[in-house]
Amino acid sequence: MYPKRPQCLLCEQPLADANEAVCAPCTVQLRAGIPPFCRICGREMPEPDICSDCSWRKERFFHRALSFGPYEGRLKDAILKLKEERRLELLPLLVDCLTEAYAAHLFDTHIDCLVPVPMAADKERARGFNQAERLAQGLSDRICLPVVSGLVWQGSSRSQVSRGRSMRLASMENSVALAKTAGQDLDGMIVCLIDDVYTTGATVNACAKKLHSAGARAVYVLTAAR
């Protein structure tokens, strides 16, 4: 009996390189966003402008949000398998996406540190990790910026992805809090918030508001998908 060849985590086809988690064809299918983008949230747009989601927002506490690509196809598959199936082997692939997006959009913005979006403690215990922290650390290793755990989650552990806009916005204000050392760690800093997916922006906006209250000079947002 010959040993079974390792399979791609996304398409389950045999891998040519047993050291890889994803095959070359699936990697090629990770679609990067195509400009022009919304000038605030990074959504793909027909022309450079502000999208309808951003135009109604009364208060915005982050300077700009950017992502590698749209939340679809193989990129969506990779994120879901990382979180739902705990396939940590997919982290390097998603860190590659973040690194490419950072180099394309944020390289010249003089970011001082990376701050992961926090997760409810019970949810993190159940999953075994906070994907935003893992992504931030992976990106930190690539671009040599420190990770500052400046935020903690104190609200409901219910996933925001499945909630409507009004419920999401109403739950955010009291869900995020500053870590005890946030003031001394973030004062005067240009911060880049890291998460896996940007949805309506309610979570990162609440996080950015807290970071500004700790003295952050500016807040950018970087996610793998939008």
Image (tube, helix red, strand yellow):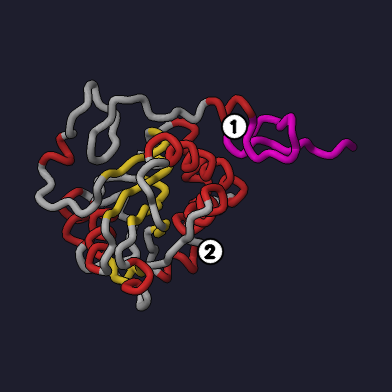
User: Which of 106/38 is in front?
Assistant: 106
Instruction: Give the number of marks.
Output: 2
Q: Is residue 211 above or below residue 179?
A: above
Identify the residue shown where x is 84% and y is 39%.
3
Q: Is residue 166 left or right of residue 102?
A: left
Residue 157 x/y as whole percent: 34, 65
Identify the residue shown where x is 51% and y is 62%.
129
Residue 181 x/y as whole percent: 37, 76
Q: Is residue 9 left or right of residue 63?
A: right
Q: Which residue does the numbered mark 1 point to in the structure image?
A: 11
Q: Is residue 157 above or below residue 58?
A: below
The amino acid marked with disc number 2 is Gly
Q: Is residue 69 left or right of residue 199?
A: right
Q: Which residue does the numbered mark 2 point to in the structure image?
A: 128
| Location of residue 113 by image quarter | bottom left
Residue 45 x/y as whole percent: 25, 26
Identify the residue shown where x is 26% and y is 40%.
41
The amino acid marked with disc number 1 is Cys
| Location of residue 56 by image quarter | top left
**Type of secondary structure dominating the magenta stretch:** loop
**Bounds of the magenta span?**
1-23
User: Which of 58/215 is in front?
Assistant: 215
Q: CA distance from mark 1 to mark 2?
A: 25 Å
How many residues crowd mark 1 within 10 Å: few (<14), some (14–19), many (20+)? some
Q: Secondary structure at mark 2?
A: loop
Q: Extreme bottom residue here?
A: 180
Q: Is residue 119 left or right of residue 48?
A: right
Q: Secondary structure at mark 1?
A: loop
